[in-house]
Image (cartoon, rainbow, N blue to C red):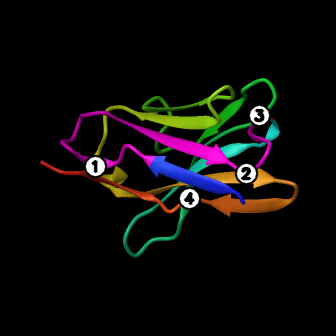
Amino acid sequence: QVQLVESGGGLVQPGGSLRLSCAASGFTFYNSPMSWYRQAPGKQRELVARVISIGGITNYADSVKGRFTISRDNAKNTVYLQMNSLKSEDTAVYYCNARHSGRTYWGQGTQVTVSS
């Protein structure tokens, strides 16, 4: 079955960095678009970044452009989210998302807290 396992969340001070990882299994990773979403308390889940399968084309939410970088390693079936210059408003649960064969899959989420 499809599994998406996130890791790398934690507590970081404003201006700091974190790298999230999402290990995928149970589907053909290399040709599946992969995304990171986040959900802050009391807010709707929102798209943070996406990387498509072919060509590695990426897109980002305006709020994270220039600070976050999404990448994928097809040999390791893993997608990453490098987060730099973190702000308090980046505090949220971050979810890995995969689209495959017309279905959408979610990881369990990893908490990112930006606070001094």
Instruction: For marks 1 and 2, give the one nearer the viewer.
Output: 2
Whether residue 37 appears in magenta in the rendering, the answer is no
Cα–Cα gap, marks 1 and 3: 28 Å
Cα–Cα gap, marks 2 and 4: 13 Å
Q: Amino acid at mark 1?
A: Gly
Q: Amino acid at mark 3?
A: Tyr
Cα–Cα gap, marks 2 and 3: 12 Å
User: Which element carries disc 4, helix, strand or loop?
Assistant: loop
Identify the residue under disc 3: 30
Identify the residue under disc 2: 26
Crowd tier of the residue under label 4, counting other residues whose Cα lies within 10 Å: few below 14, some 14–19, many 20 or above: some
Q: Amino acid at mark 4?
A: Gly
Q: Which mark is residue 10?
A: 1
User: Which element carries disc 1, helix, strand or loop?
Assistant: strand
Image point (56%, 59%), residue name: 107
Image point (68%, 44%), residue name: 34
Q: Quadrant of the N terminus?
A: bottom right
Q: Residue furthest left?
A: 116
Where in the figure is residue 51, as x and y percent of width and height? 68, 36
Where in the figure is residue 46, as x and y percent of width and height? 55, 59
User: Which element carries disc 3, helix, strand or loop?
Assistant: helix
Cα–Cα gap, marks 3 and 4: 17 Å
Q: Nearer the viewer, residue 58 or 2?
A: 2
Q: Which residues are magenta?
A: 7-30
Q: Amino acid at mark 2?
A: Gly
In the visual, does 102 lie left or right of 19?
A: right
| Up-down relation of residue 82 to residue 27 (above or below) | above
Crowd tier of the residue under label 2, counting other residues whose Cα lies within 10 Å: few below 14, some 14–19, many 20 or above: few
Instruction: For marks 2 and 4, give the one nearer the viewer.
Output: 2
Identify the residue under disc 4: 107
Mark 1 vs 2: CB contact within 8 A:
no
